[in-house]
Amino acid sequence: MSKELITCLEDQDVKEAAELMQSKQIRRVPILNKDKRLVGMLSLGDLAHRTQDSKLAGKTLEEVSTPGKSSQ
């Protein structure tokens, strides 16, 4: 578990969330509303299913799974 909490806001673009997941090497990210309350979770599976963009999901999975790529 990480000490730093990584989140996205519900109105952020899904590609931004995918880039964050890639750069931080995380498979799930909590989604917050404007009041900073938890409203959901975004997973790698959600990227593939909801966006219908297999390249985005595949690239994110590859980056998350590559050891030593985290910018933390």
Image: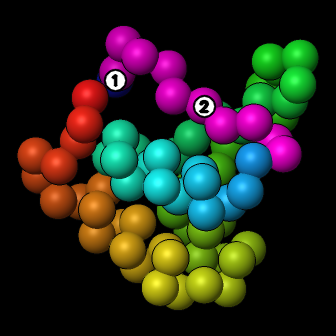
Q: Is residue 37 above or below residue 43?
A: above
**x 83%, y 20%: residue:** 37
The location of residue 4, given as percent across then percent down, is 41, 16
Amino acid of disc 1: Met
Q: Main secondary structure of the magenta part?
A: loop
Residue 3 vs residue 34: left or right? left
Residue under circle 1?
Answer: 1
Q: Quadrant of residue 43?
A: bottom right
Sequence order check: which comes first, mark 2 or mark 1? 1
Quadrant in which residue 63 is drawn: bottom left
- Give the amino acid type for the residue marked by disc 2 in the picture: Thr
Q: Secondary structure at mark 2?
A: loop
Mark 1 lies on a secondary structure that is loop
Q: Alpha-carbon distance for marks 2 and 1?
A: 14 Å
Residue 67 versus residue 72: which sits nearer the camera? Answer: 72
Tell me the residue that label 2 is attached to: 7
Say whether residue 36 is left or right of residue 60: right
Query: Whole-percent x and y of residue 55?
Result: 47, 85
